[in-house]
Image (cartoon, grey):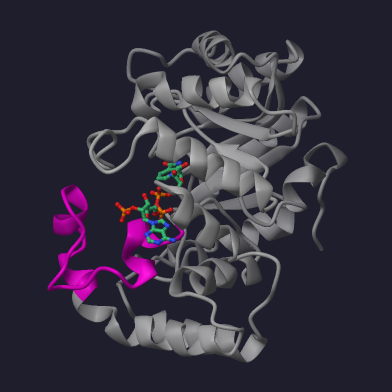
Amino acid sequence: MTKVSNETRFLHAIEMGLGAWQWGDRVVWGYGQTHTDKDIREAFDVSLSLGIRFVDTAEIYGSGYSERLLGQFLKEIDQPVLVATKYFPWPWRITKGFIPRALKGSLERTGLESVDLYQIHWSSPLMSPETMMEGMVECVKRGWTRTVGVSNFGEKRMIQAYTTLARHGIPLASNQVHYSLLNREVEKNGTLARCKELGIRLIAYSPLEKGLLTGKYSSENPPPGVRGSQYVELLKRIPPVIKLLQEIGLNHGDKTISQVSLNWLICKGALPIPGAKNLQQAEQNAGGAGWKLTEEEVAKLDEATDHIREYSKT
Ligand SMILES: NC(=O)c1ccc[n+]([C@@H]2O[C@H](COP(=O)([O-])OP(=O)(O)OC[C@H]3O[C@@H](n4cnc5c(N)ncnc54)[C@H](OP(=O)(O)O)[C@@H]3O)[C@@H](O)[C@H]2O)c1
């Protein structure tokens, strides 16, 4: 039985969001070379016009530039946008007091009085989920965030966070984790099932496996930079998956490989937040929502990707 609390219900009503890691990040995403502020603005605008109203950023994206850019955009539009950002538990910031202080910085950069979702970016061996959540409770009490989430938390730490917040009458809104057709760890290790059981929204990051699930990359044409070396093995195994995605897309009025990949996540009960570098990518990704694959198609994609990588046994 799913128990979704009233405070977090809005997150369950969102089909898809927009990731903002690309906004200002040079190291992985080549900001300034492959895309500019103008491209990002166009991606943001087209997303909004196509009904995407949830943006995921973080204090570390572009060292604060992503939040600043979002703040600038928000001032220039008149539609409501739901904003999620994140606290990074650097080893020198491991007491609970750092969390509201960091959120204050995010609020200043975005120009907002409060965000809709404040997430812990990664778990840390130096900071317990209890300490993290005590800091988050303070953020809620000050009215600086509407809801609280975690990211990259395994099932055990997620439950610890959930339980600590519950003592304060606060629901754990979400767990943002790596989830795509090419990385189904959260299905295999029980995190997805546990989220559904507890009414925690599972937010799927890198839902296009950093561009691999668009069909434009192959072993002969790998993605640039760090992604190229990260995906050497996976690139060798994806051609049959790409072919199947293409075939399935044809059954739905020529949906693209990316759109079918994003829709598969929606069918699994996750909230994908694809990143986009320009208008064309954002426009295409928005078309991943608003329709549904059949159960048979989902099963076919499951079968095709079941053994695409090895999963740790938990
Ligand atoms: N919590 C965490 O630890 C964490 C970690 C990672 C990401 N995230 C969040 O999740 C969001 C999405 O994940 P991600 O950015 O890692 O990866 P992603 O969404 O899987 O891939 C995004 C990249 O794929 C390419 N792309 C996207 N749409 C495309 C399209 N329609 N056609 C062709 N290429 C397309 C673009 O790069 P190229 O054009 O260069 O190929 C784009 O930058 C991030 O922005 C961030 O908000 C969170």
Where is 246 relative to 168, above or below? below
Residue displayed at 66% across by 53% down: 50
Residue 124, image x, y percentages: 39, 31
Is residue 122 among the parts visible in the rendering? Answer: no
Q: Which picture quadrant has residue 148?
A: top right
Residue 182, image x, y percentages: 38, 69
Please name whichever residue, 205 or 142, is drawn nearer the observer in this view of the structure: 205
Q: Which picture quadrant has residue 132?
A: top right
Residue 197, image x, y percentages: 72, 59
**For residue 227: magenta?**
yes
Please name whichever residue, 174 or 227, is drawn nearer the observer in this view of the structure: 227
Q: Which picture quadrant has residue 134?
A: top right
Where is 6 relative to 102, above or below? below
Residue displayed at 66% across by 16% down: 112
Residue lying farthest to the right in this orientation: 6
Left or right for 144, reference 159 = right
Is residue 251 among the parts visible in the rendering? Answer: yes
| Residues drawn in magenta | 207-235
